Amino acid sequence: MSRIQIPRGTQDILPGTVEMWHHVEEQIREICRRYNYQEIRTPIFEHTELFQRGVGETTDVVEKEMYSVESRGEDALTLRPEGTAGVVRAYVEKKLYGAPTQPVKLYYLGPMFRHERPQAGRLRQFTQFGVEAIGSHDPAMDAEVIAVAYRFYEQLGLRGLTVELNSVGTLEDRARHRVELLEYLSARRSQLCPDCQSRIDRNPLRVLDCKVQKDQELTKDAPSILDYLSEESAAHFEAVKQYLDSLGISYRINPRLVRGLDYYTLTAFEIKMQDIGAVETLCGGGRYNGLVAELGGEDVPGIGFALSIERLLLALEKTGITLPVPEGIDCYLVTQTPQAKGVTVRLLDQLRQAGIAAEMDYLDRKMKGQLKAADRLKARYTIIIGEAELERGTAVLKSMDSGDQEEVAQDQLVDALLGKLGDK
Ligand code: HAM
Protein backbone atom coordinates (compact mmCIF):
# COMPACT_ATOMS: atom_id res chain seq x y z
CA MET A 1 0.00 0.00 0.00
CA SER A 2 1.26 3.49 -0.74
CA ARG A 3 1.95 5.73 2.21
CA ILE A 4 -0.15 8.76 2.92
CA GLN A 5 1.89 11.87 3.53
CA ILE A 6 1.37 14.94 5.64
CA PRO A 7 -0.44 17.78 3.78
CA ARG A 8 1.86 20.47 2.32
CA GLY A 9 2.59 23.37 4.63
CA THR A 10 1.78 21.48 7.83
CA GLN A 11 4.08 20.03 10.46
CA ASP A 12 4.26 17.09 12.81
CA ILE A 13 5.74 18.26 16.07
CA LEU A 14 7.43 15.22 17.53
CA PRO A 15 8.72 14.43 21.00
CA GLY A 16 12.11 16.07 21.27
CA THR A 17 10.74 19.22 19.62
CA VAL A 18 7.43 19.51 21.39
CA GLU A 19 9.28 20.32 24.63
CA MET A 20 10.40 23.58 23.04
CA TRP A 21 6.79 24.37 22.28
CA HIS A 22 5.89 23.70 25.89
CA HIS A 23 8.60 26.07 27.01
CA VAL A 24 7.40 28.80 24.65
CA GLU A 25 3.79 28.24 25.72
CA GLU A 26 4.79 28.62 29.36
CA GLN A 27 6.57 31.88 28.56
CA ILE A 28 3.47 33.13 26.77
CA ARG A 29 1.25 32.40 29.73
CA GLU A 30 3.77 33.96 32.07
CA ILE A 31 4.14 37.19 30.13
CA CYS A 32 0.38 37.50 29.74
CA ARG A 33 -0.02 37.02 33.48
CA ARG A 34 2.40 39.86 34.12
CA TYR A 35 0.83 42.23 31.62
CA ASN A 36 -2.64 41.18 32.77
CA TYR A 37 -4.05 39.64 29.57
CA GLN A 38 -6.56 36.83 30.00
CA GLU A 39 -6.89 33.88 27.71
CA ILE A 40 -9.77 33.56 25.29
CA ARG A 41 -10.47 30.48 23.19
CA THR A 42 -12.65 30.93 20.14
CA PRO A 43 -13.64 28.33 17.51
CA ILE A 44 -11.17 27.25 14.87
CA PHE A 45 -13.83 27.86 12.22
CA GLU A 46 -16.17 30.79 11.89
CA HIS A 47 -18.75 31.98 9.39
CA THR A 48 -16.90 32.99 6.23
CA GLU A 49 -18.67 36.35 6.34
CA LEU A 50 -16.79 37.24 9.54
CA PHE A 51 -13.48 37.32 7.71
CA GLN A 52 -14.93 38.91 4.58
CA ARG A 53 -16.25 41.77 6.66
CA GLY A 54 -13.57 41.83 9.35
CA VAL A 55 -10.34 41.19 7.47
CA GLY A 56 -11.52 42.74 4.19
CA GLU A 57 -12.74 41.44 0.81
CA THR A 58 -9.75 42.73 -1.14
CA THR A 59 -7.01 41.32 1.08
CA ASP A 60 -4.87 38.42 -0.10
CA VAL A 61 -5.95 36.50 2.98
CA VAL A 62 -9.63 36.64 2.05
CA GLU A 63 -9.24 36.60 -1.72
CA LYS A 64 -6.74 33.79 -2.08
CA GLU A 65 -5.88 32.10 1.15
CA MET A 66 -8.96 30.99 3.01
CA TYR A 67 -9.93 27.38 3.55
CA SER A 68 -13.70 27.56 3.22
CA VAL A 69 -16.34 24.87 3.06
CA GLU A 70 -19.97 24.85 2.16
CA SER A 71 -21.55 23.51 5.26
CA ARG A 72 -24.47 21.20 4.50
CA GLY A 73 -26.96 23.86 3.56
CA GLU A 74 -25.81 26.27 6.25
CA ASP A 75 -23.72 29.41 5.81
CA ALA A 76 -20.22 28.83 4.48
CA LEU A 77 -17.60 28.24 7.15
CA THR A 78 -13.90 29.09 7.06
CA LEU A 79 -10.92 27.81 9.02
CA ARG A 80 -9.70 30.94 10.77
CA PRO A 81 -6.83 32.62 8.91
CA GLU A 82 -6.16 34.91 11.89
CA GLY A 83 -7.45 35.51 15.40
CA THR A 84 -8.57 39.13 15.66
CA ALA A 85 -11.89 38.82 13.83
CA GLY A 86 -13.00 35.90 16.00
CA VAL A 87 -11.98 37.63 19.21
CA VAL A 88 -13.86 40.80 18.25
CA ARG A 89 -16.89 38.71 17.27
CA ALA A 90 -16.82 37.09 20.71
CA TYR A 91 -16.34 40.50 22.36
CA VAL A 92 -19.50 41.79 20.69
CA GLU A 93 -21.53 38.59 20.99
CA LYS A 94 -20.63 37.87 24.62
CA LYS A 95 -21.01 41.56 25.56
CA LEU A 96 -17.51 41.86 26.94
CA TYR A 97 -17.89 45.66 26.64
CA GLY A 98 -20.00 45.25 29.79
CA ALA A 99 -17.26 43.39 31.70
CA PRO A 100 -16.40 44.95 35.06
CA THR A 101 -12.76 45.50 34.15
CA GLN A 102 -11.97 47.67 31.17
CA PRO A 103 -10.23 47.77 28.78
CA VAL A 104 -10.74 44.11 27.95
CA LYS A 105 -7.31 42.55 27.52
CA LEU A 106 -7.26 39.13 25.92
CA TYR A 107 -4.72 36.70 24.51
CA TYR A 108 -4.99 33.59 22.41
CA LEU A 109 -2.76 30.80 21.28
CA GLY A 110 -3.76 28.38 18.58
CA PRO A 111 -3.70 27.20 14.99
CA MET A 112 -4.53 29.45 12.02
CA PHE A 113 -4.88 28.39 8.40
CA ARG A 114 -3.87 30.14 5.19
CA HIS A 115 -3.50 28.62 1.76
CA GLU A 116 -0.09 30.12 1.02
CA ARG A 117 2.90 28.88 -0.91
CA PRO A 118 4.80 27.00 1.79
CA GLN A 119 8.42 27.84 2.60
CA ALA A 120 10.52 28.08 5.75
CA GLY A 121 8.49 30.18 8.18
CA ARG A 122 5.43 30.20 5.96
CA LEU A 123 3.02 27.38 6.60
CA ARG A 124 -0.56 26.56 5.77
CA GLN A 125 -1.28 25.65 9.35
CA PHE A 126 0.63 27.81 11.81
CA THR A 127 0.25 28.74 15.44
CA GLN A 128 -0.37 32.29 16.51
CA PHE A 129 0.08 33.88 19.88
CA GLY A 130 -1.86 37.12 19.80
CA VAL A 131 -3.21 39.74 22.16
CA GLU A 132 -6.12 42.13 21.75
CA ALA A 133 -6.77 45.11 24.03
CA ILE A 134 -10.24 46.40 23.35
CA GLY A 135 -11.79 49.58 24.76
CA SER A 136 -8.98 52.13 25.06
CA HIS A 137 -7.85 55.00 22.85
CA ASP A 138 -4.80 55.65 25.02
CA PRO A 139 -1.53 55.66 23.03
CA ALA A 140 0.08 54.11 26.13
CA MET A 141 -2.04 51.06 25.31
CA ASP A 142 -0.38 50.91 21.87
CA ALA A 143 3.04 51.05 23.52
CA GLU A 144 2.07 48.31 25.96
CA VAL A 145 0.91 45.99 23.19
CA ILE A 146 4.17 46.49 21.30
CA ALA A 147 6.07 45.94 24.55
CA VAL A 148 4.35 42.60 25.22
CA ALA A 149 5.65 41.21 21.92
CA TYR A 150 9.06 42.83 22.24
CA ARG A 151 9.69 41.73 25.82
CA PHE A 152 8.43 38.26 25.01
CA TYR A 153 11.09 37.87 22.31
CA GLU A 154 13.71 39.38 24.60
CA GLN A 155 12.79 36.98 27.36
CA LEU A 156 13.43 34.08 25.02
CA GLY A 157 16.86 35.48 24.22
CA LEU A 158 16.26 37.03 20.79
CA ARG A 159 18.29 40.14 20.04
CA GLY A 160 18.69 42.34 17.01
CA LEU A 161 14.99 42.92 16.59
CA THR A 162 13.63 45.94 14.78
CA VAL A 163 10.24 47.42 15.53
CA GLU A 164 8.91 49.09 12.41
CA LEU A 165 6.27 51.65 13.15
CA ASN A 166 3.80 53.58 11.07
CA SER A 167 0.48 55.30 11.34
CA VAL A 168 -1.98 54.40 8.62
CA GLY A 169 -4.28 57.16 9.85
CA THR A 170 -8.03 57.18 10.20
CA LEU A 171 -10.40 56.48 7.33
CA GLU A 172 -10.64 60.23 6.72
CA ASP A 173 -6.84 60.65 6.72
CA ARG A 174 -6.56 57.79 4.28
CA ALA A 175 -9.25 59.16 1.97
CA ARG A 176 -7.24 62.39 1.59
CA HIS A 177 -4.02 60.49 1.06
CA ARG A 178 -5.69 58.16 -1.42
CA VAL A 179 -6.57 60.95 -3.86
CA GLU A 180 -2.94 61.98 -4.24
CA LEU A 181 -1.61 58.45 -4.11
CA LEU A 182 -3.96 57.39 -6.90
CA GLU A 183 -2.78 60.24 -9.04
CA TYR A 184 0.85 59.30 -8.42
CA LEU A 185 0.30 55.59 -9.06
CA SER A 186 -1.91 56.04 -12.12
CA ALA A 187 0.87 57.94 -13.83
CA ARG A 188 3.09 54.88 -13.38
CA ARG A 189 0.49 52.19 -13.81
CA SER A 190 1.86 50.48 -16.90
CA GLN A 191 5.31 50.05 -15.34
CA LEU A 192 4.03 48.36 -12.19
CA CYS A 193 3.70 44.60 -11.74
CA PRO A 194 0.34 43.07 -12.74
CA ASP A 195 -0.64 42.55 -9.10
CA CYS A 196 -0.05 46.20 -8.32
CA GLN A 197 -1.95 47.32 -11.39
CA SER A 198 -5.04 45.73 -9.95
CA ARG A 199 -4.15 46.88 -6.42
CA ILE A 200 -4.32 50.50 -7.64
CA ASP A 201 -8.04 50.15 -8.17
CA ARG A 202 -8.83 48.00 -5.20
CA ASN A 203 -6.46 49.10 -2.47
CA PRO A 204 -3.76 51.54 -3.62
CA LEU A 205 -2.05 51.69 -0.22
CA ARG A 206 -1.08 48.05 -0.65
CA VAL A 207 1.04 48.95 -3.70
CA LEU A 208 3.52 50.53 -1.31
CA ASP A 209 3.97 47.13 0.30
CA CYS A 210 4.84 45.34 -2.96
CA LYS A 211 7.92 43.15 -2.65
CA VAL A 212 8.93 43.55 -6.32
CA GLN A 213 12.14 45.59 -6.45
CA LYS A 214 11.16 47.57 -9.55
CA ASP A 215 7.85 48.56 -8.00
CA GLN A 216 9.58 49.68 -4.84
CA GLU A 217 11.82 51.97 -6.85
CA LEU A 218 8.94 53.30 -8.89
CA THR A 219 6.99 54.20 -5.77
CA LYS A 220 9.97 55.55 -3.83
CA ASP A 221 8.65 59.09 -3.77
CA ALA A 222 4.96 58.26 -3.49
CA PRO A 223 2.97 60.54 -1.17
CA SER A 224 3.46 59.36 2.41
CA ILE A 225 0.46 58.70 4.61
CA LEU A 226 2.29 60.44 7.43
CA ASP A 227 1.88 63.76 5.59
CA TYR A 228 -1.89 63.33 5.58
CA LEU A 229 -2.52 62.63 9.24
CA SER A 230 -4.97 64.94 10.99
CA GLU A 231 -3.69 66.84 13.99
CA GLU A 232 -5.29 64.29 16.30
CA SER A 233 -3.86 61.29 14.44
CA ALA A 234 -0.42 62.88 14.37
CA ALA A 235 -0.61 63.58 18.11
CA HIS A 236 -1.52 59.95 18.76
CA PHE A 237 1.45 58.78 16.71
CA GLU A 238 3.78 61.19 18.53
CA ALA A 239 2.56 59.94 21.89
CA VAL A 240 3.09 56.29 20.93
CA LYS A 241 6.66 57.12 19.95
CA GLN A 242 7.27 58.93 23.20
CA TYR A 243 5.96 56.03 25.27
CA LEU A 244 8.17 53.63 23.33
CA ASP A 245 11.11 55.95 24.00
CA SER A 246 10.41 55.88 27.69
CA LEU A 247 10.18 52.08 27.59
CA GLY A 248 13.57 52.01 25.89
CA ILE A 249 12.15 50.14 22.91
CA SER A 250 13.80 51.44 19.76
CA TYR A 251 11.82 51.59 16.56
CA ARG A 252 12.18 52.65 12.97
CA ILE A 253 9.49 54.73 11.32
CA ASN A 254 8.47 53.09 8.08
CA PRO A 255 5.86 55.20 6.27
CA ARG A 256 5.45 52.38 3.75
CA LEU A 257 4.46 49.82 6.32
CA VAL A 258 1.04 48.65 5.24
CA ARG A 259 -0.37 45.63 6.91
CA GLY A 260 -1.99 42.87 4.88
CA LEU A 261 -5.36 43.11 6.62
CA ASP A 262 -7.89 45.90 6.12
CA TYR A 263 -8.97 46.70 9.66
CA TYR A 264 -6.01 48.81 10.70
CA THR A 265 -6.27 52.46 11.72
CA LEU A 266 -3.55 54.73 13.19
CA THR A 267 -0.74 52.64 14.70
CA ALA A 268 0.59 49.78 12.59
CA PHE A 269 3.74 47.88 13.48
CA GLU A 270 5.86 44.87 12.69
CA ILE A 271 8.77 43.30 14.48
CA LYS A 272 11.45 42.08 12.15
CA MET A 273 14.70 40.23 12.32
CA GLN A 274 17.29 40.43 9.57
CA ASP A 275 19.06 37.40 8.16
CA ILE A 276 16.60 34.75 9.09
CA GLY A 277 15.66 33.91 5.53
CA ALA A 278 12.91 35.03 3.23
CA VAL A 279 10.40 35.62 5.96
CA GLU A 280 11.78 38.23 8.27
CA THR A 281 8.61 39.56 9.85
CA LEU A 282 8.20 37.84 13.16
CA CYS A 283 5.18 39.74 14.43
CA GLY A 284 2.57 42.16 13.16
CA GLY A 285 -0.18 44.23 14.66
CA GLY A 286 -1.84 47.56 15.09
CA ARG A 287 -4.93 49.51 15.98
CA TYR A 288 -8.35 48.65 14.59
CA ASN A 289 -10.64 51.39 15.80
CA GLY A 290 -13.44 50.58 13.33
CA LEU A 291 -13.54 46.81 13.63
CA VAL A 292 -15.85 46.40 16.63
CA ALA A 293 -18.47 48.58 14.94
CA GLU A 294 -17.91 46.81 11.61
CA LEU A 295 -18.79 43.54 13.34
CA GLY A 296 -21.98 44.90 14.85
CA GLY A 297 -20.76 46.39 18.13
CA GLU A 298 -20.50 49.92 19.39
CA ASP A 299 -17.77 52.28 18.26
CA VAL A 300 -15.06 50.79 20.49
CA PRO A 301 -11.34 51.01 19.68
CA GLY A 302 -8.90 48.11 19.81
CA ILE A 303 -5.28 47.21 19.28
CA GLY A 304 -3.37 43.95 19.16
CA PHE A 305 -0.69 41.85 17.54
CA ALA A 306 -0.07 38.29 16.53
CA LEU A 307 3.12 36.31 16.06
CA SER A 308 3.66 32.73 15.05
CA ILE A 309 5.52 30.22 17.15
CA GLU A 310 6.91 28.66 13.96
CA ARG A 311 8.68 31.89 12.95
CA LEU A 312 9.85 32.43 16.50
CA LEU A 313 11.44 28.96 16.61
CA LEU A 314 13.03 29.58 13.22
CA ALA A 315 14.51 32.84 14.51
CA LEU A 316 15.83 31.11 17.63
CA GLU A 317 17.36 28.37 15.52
CA LYS A 318 19.03 30.84 13.16
CA THR A 319 20.45 32.74 16.11
CA GLY A 320 21.71 29.55 17.69
CA ILE A 321 19.62 29.90 20.81
CA THR A 322 18.63 26.66 22.48
CA LEU A 323 15.76 26.71 24.90
CA PRO A 324 16.11 25.16 28.32
CA VAL A 325 14.01 22.05 28.04
CA PRO A 326 13.66 19.44 30.75
CA GLU A 327 15.10 16.05 29.92
CA GLY A 328 14.79 12.58 31.28
CA ILE A 329 12.62 10.79 33.77
CA ASP A 330 13.11 10.43 37.51
CA CYS A 331 13.26 6.70 37.79
CA TYR A 332 13.26 3.39 35.89
CA LEU A 333 12.10 0.17 37.52
CA VAL A 334 14.15 -2.86 36.58
CA THR A 335 12.56 -6.24 37.12
CA GLN A 336 14.98 -9.11 37.35
CA THR A 337 12.54 -11.95 37.68
CA PRO A 338 9.07 -12.45 36.25
CA GLN A 339 7.81 -13.02 39.80
CA ALA A 340 8.68 -9.46 40.73
CA LYS A 341 6.53 -8.00 37.97
CA GLY A 342 3.40 -7.70 40.11
CA VAL A 343 5.33 -5.74 42.74
CA THR A 344 6.96 -3.59 40.07
CA VAL A 345 3.62 -2.66 38.53
CA ARG A 346 2.27 -1.71 41.97
CA LEU A 347 5.38 0.28 42.94
CA LEU A 348 5.41 2.07 39.60
CA ASP A 349 1.85 3.23 40.19
CA GLN A 350 2.71 4.42 43.71
CA LEU A 351 5.68 6.40 42.45
CA ARG A 352 3.63 8.03 39.73
CA GLN A 353 0.85 8.91 42.16
CA ALA A 354 3.48 10.62 44.29
CA GLY A 355 4.44 12.80 41.34
CA ILE A 356 7.53 10.93 40.24
CA ALA A 357 8.11 10.38 36.51
CA ALA A 358 8.71 6.65 36.37
CA GLU A 359 8.90 3.92 33.73
CA MET A 360 9.35 0.14 33.49
CA ASP A 361 10.09 -2.44 30.84
CA TYR A 362 7.25 -3.63 28.61
CA LEU A 363 9.35 -5.57 26.11
CA ASP A 364 10.55 -8.50 28.22
CA ARG A 365 14.11 -7.23 28.08
CA LYS A 366 16.87 -8.82 30.07
CA MET A 367 18.41 -6.90 32.97
CA LYS A 368 21.10 -5.44 30.70
CA GLY A 369 18.55 -4.32 28.13
CA GLN A 370 16.45 -2.70 30.85
CA LEU A 371 19.43 -0.76 32.18
CA LYS A 372 20.18 0.40 28.66
CA ALA A 373 16.58 1.55 28.30
CA ALA A 374 16.92 3.44 31.61
CA ASP A 375 20.02 5.11 30.22
CA ARG A 376 18.32 6.10 26.99
CA LEU A 377 15.44 7.61 28.94
CA LYS A 378 18.01 9.53 31.00
CA ALA A 379 16.56 8.14 34.21
CA ARG A 380 18.14 9.72 37.27
CA TYR A 381 17.54 6.63 39.43
CA THR A 382 16.86 2.97 38.88
CA ILE A 383 14.98 0.69 41.20
CA ILE A 384 16.01 -2.93 40.87
CA ILE A 385 14.03 -5.81 42.28
CA GLY A 386 15.68 -9.22 42.02
CA GLU A 387 14.80 -12.49 43.68
CA ALA A 388 16.54 -11.66 46.94
CA GLU A 389 14.90 -8.25 47.22
CA LEU A 390 11.53 -9.77 46.37
CA GLU A 391 11.91 -12.17 49.25
CA ARG A 392 12.98 -9.45 51.66
CA GLY A 393 10.29 -6.99 50.54
CA THR A 394 12.96 -4.51 49.48
CA ALA A 395 14.39 -2.91 46.35
CA VAL A 396 17.77 -1.52 45.35
CA LEU A 397 17.65 2.21 44.73
CA LYS A 398 20.55 3.33 42.56
CA SER A 399 21.66 6.75 41.45
CA MET A 400 22.58 6.70 37.78
CA ASP A 401 24.78 9.75 38.29
CA SER A 402 27.00 8.60 41.11
CA GLY A 403 26.41 4.86 40.95
CA ASP A 404 25.64 4.90 44.71
CA GLN A 405 23.05 2.37 45.72
CA GLU A 406 21.17 1.28 48.80
CA GLU A 407 18.56 -1.29 49.72
CA VAL A 408 15.26 0.22 50.77
CA ALA A 409 12.08 -1.42 52.09
CA GLN A 410 9.43 -1.37 49.37
CA ASP A 411 6.99 0.58 51.51
CA GLN A 412 9.68 3.24 52.12
CA LEU A 413 10.62 3.57 48.49
CA VAL A 414 8.40 6.50 47.54
CA ASP A 415 9.61 8.58 50.49
CA ALA A 416 13.22 7.64 49.92
CA LEU A 417 13.13 8.60 46.28
CA LEU A 418 11.16 11.80 46.93
CA GLY A 419 13.84 12.74 49.46
CA LYS A 420 16.64 12.19 46.98
CA LEU A 421 14.88 14.01 44.14
CA GLY A 422 14.08 16.88 46.50
CA ASP A 423 17.74 17.19 47.52
CA LYS A 424 18.75 18.04 44.00
P1 HAM B 1 -0.57 38.96 10.23
O1 HAM B 1 0.50 39.95 9.92
O2 HAM B 1 -1.36 38.43 9.08
O3 HAM B 1 -1.51 39.65 11.30
O4 HAM B 1 0.08 37.75 10.98
C1 HAM B 1 0.77 37.95 12.19
C2 HAM B 1 1.93 37.00 12.32
O5 HAM B 1 1.49 35.67 12.12
C3 HAM B 1 3.03 37.19 11.30
O6 HAM B 1 3.90 38.22 11.65
C4 HAM B 1 3.71 35.83 11.38
O7 HAM B 1 4.49 35.73 12.57
C5 HAM B 1 2.53 34.91 11.56
N1 HAM B 1 2.12 34.31 10.27
C6 HAM B 1 1.25 34.80 9.38
N2 HAM B 1 1.11 33.97 8.34
C7 HAM B 1 1.93 32.92 8.60
C8 HAM B 1 2.24 31.71 7.91
N3 HAM B 1 1.66 31.39 6.76
N4 HAM B 1 3.13 30.86 8.48
C9 HAM B 1 3.71 31.15 9.66
N5 HAM B 1 3.46 32.26 10.35
C10 HAM B 1 2.58 33.14 9.83
C11 HAM B 1 -2.58 39.05 11.89
O8 HAM B 1 -2.84 37.89 11.78
C12 HAM B 1 -3.37 39.98 12.77
N6 HAM B 1 -4.55 39.25 13.28
C13 HAM B 1 -2.51 40.51 13.90
C14 HAM B 1 -3.27 41.44 14.78
C15 HAM B 1 -3.81 41.15 15.99
N7 HAM B 1 -3.55 42.70 14.52
C16 HAM B 1 -4.26 43.20 15.52
N8 HAM B 1 -4.43 42.27 16.40
Image: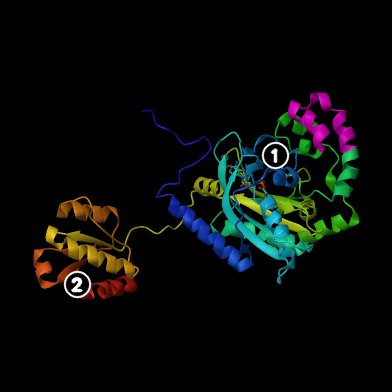
Q: Position of residue 12 (x, y in %)?
A: 45, 43
- Disc number for residue 62: 1
Where on the picture, by quarter, is residue 330?
A: bottom left
- Residue 357 is situated, as x and y percent measured from the top left of the image, at 33, 63
Q: Is residue 95 left or right of residue 181?
A: left
Q: How would you classify the magenta stretch by its main secondary structure?
A: helix
| Mark 2 Cβ inside 8 Å of ligand 1 | no
Between discs 2 and 1, the one toward the N terminus: 1
Three-letter amino acid code at disc 2? Gln
Give the structural element (helix, strand or loop) at label 2.
helix
Q: Name the quarter where the N terminus is drawn.
A: top left
Residue 339 x, y percent position in the rendering:
12, 61
Residue 117 shows in this picture: yes
Amino acid type at circle 1 is: Val
In terms of depth relative to the viewer, which is nearer, 210 or 62?
A: 62
Q: Residue at x 56, y 52 (%)?
A: 110
**Image color mode:** rainbow
Rendered location of residue 198, percent (x, y): 78, 29
Q: Is residue 158 magenta?
A: no
Q: Categorize mark 2 by other alpha carbons within 10 Å: few (<14), some (14-19), many (20+).
A: some
Using the rendered view, name the quadrant where residue 336 is placed: bottom left
- Give the magenta range: 180-204
Q: Is residue 408 left or right of residue 13?
A: left
Residue denoted by label 2 = 410
Q: Nearer the viewer, residue 261 or 20?
A: 261
In the rendered view, tell whether residue 101 sits above or below residue 24.
below
Residue plotted at (78% across, 57% down): 297
